[in-house]
Image (cartoon, helix red, strand yellow):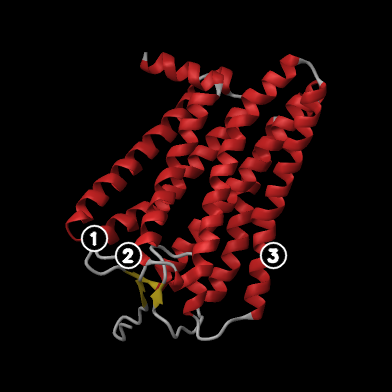
Amino acid sequence: MDDELNVTYITLYGYVEMGKYRYLVFVIMFTAYILAICFNITIVTLIWKHKNLHEPMYIFIAALLLNSVFFSTALYPKLFIDILSEKQVISYSACLVQFLLYYSLSASEFLLLSAMAYDRFASICKPLQYTTIVRKDTVSILLVLAWLVPACLIAVPVILSADMKLCNFTLQGVFCNNAVYNLACASSTARSIYGVVALLCNAILPLLFILFTYTRILIISYKSSREVRTKAAQTCLPHLLVLISFSCFCAYDVIIVRLGSDFPSNVRLTMTLQAVLYHPLFNPIIYGLKMKEISKQLKRLFC
């Protein structure tokens, strides 16, 4: 505690002594960050530039990739500083901001994937009504809600935690996640209940909606012609791969917080860095390879 400036600092206990490997880890992480930014921005630029990609499905993909850029930028710069530092600390206010960005952008990914599932359902199951169901204003509303709703839901516990009395100043992790609640002197029942409600709205309900939607698409596609089945496979498979990847990432985040100090520090650090490393790179690679029109434009650009 710095009495002069009245700033509370939290020590991030998720790091281990890396010694001479510190610079190697930094180079790997920095390279991954630059590649993630380049890959995501390249596909977003292609979608923005080519008018034949100005369709709801590709607009949602561009939004998802932009979300990955925001997510990476919220985490990576602080990771770089901590990897190169002898002591990993963060002010409590900055920790809450990182918490807000981390969980609101994660929830936005679930909602964007839900919007994609809705778009694919309308396109494959109701092709004649598609243009009336998924209009430009519908896409705009869904995009605004996908970013605004999670930000508002996560902002409430962040604001309430700003004046929370702390008795522990060591956080079991490499960045500020749900483990921040373990810093409080006493647990709050109201905060726990609100956390369950936020989890339900931000992750569980969107996930159930996505699973229900793709199940309906699968059933209808199975009963339809081969052309419909091919279209469903080509456009839905990338979304499902991204959903599985991100769900694994979120499940890991929940498990690692629950295990707390029982999880070995070196294994925790390795797995956390890998999770943060893979996900922003995975989305553009999947959409670049699996989406036919995007793949075609990428080949034109590079070949």
Q: Is residue 48 visible?
A: no
Q: Of the residues shown, which amino acid type is indicated by label 3?
A: Val
Q: Position of residue 81 (x, y in %)?
A: 27, 59
Residue at image point 52% right, 29% down:
287
Report the residue marked by disc 2: 15
Near mark 2 (Cα within 10 A), the count class, few <14, some 14-19 or many ≥20, is many
Q: Which one is in front in this view, the residue at disc 3 or the one at disc 1?
A: 1
Q: Separation of disc 3 and disc 1 at Cα?
A: 39 Å
Q: Kindly indicate whether the residue at mark 1 contacts the one at mark 2 (C-beta within 8 angstroms).
A: yes
Report the residue marked by disc 3: 197
Q: Separation of disc 2 and disc 3 at Cα?
A: 31 Å
Q: Is residue 269 above or below residue 140?
A: below
Report the residue marked by disc 1: 18
Q: Is residue 75 visible?
A: yes
Q: Of the residues shown, which amino acid type is indicated by label 1?
A: Met
Question: Is 300 on the left or on the right of 53, as rendered?
Answer: left
Near mark 1 (Cα within 10 A), the count class, few <14, some 14-19 or many ≥20, is some
Name the N-terminal-most of marks 3 and 1: 1
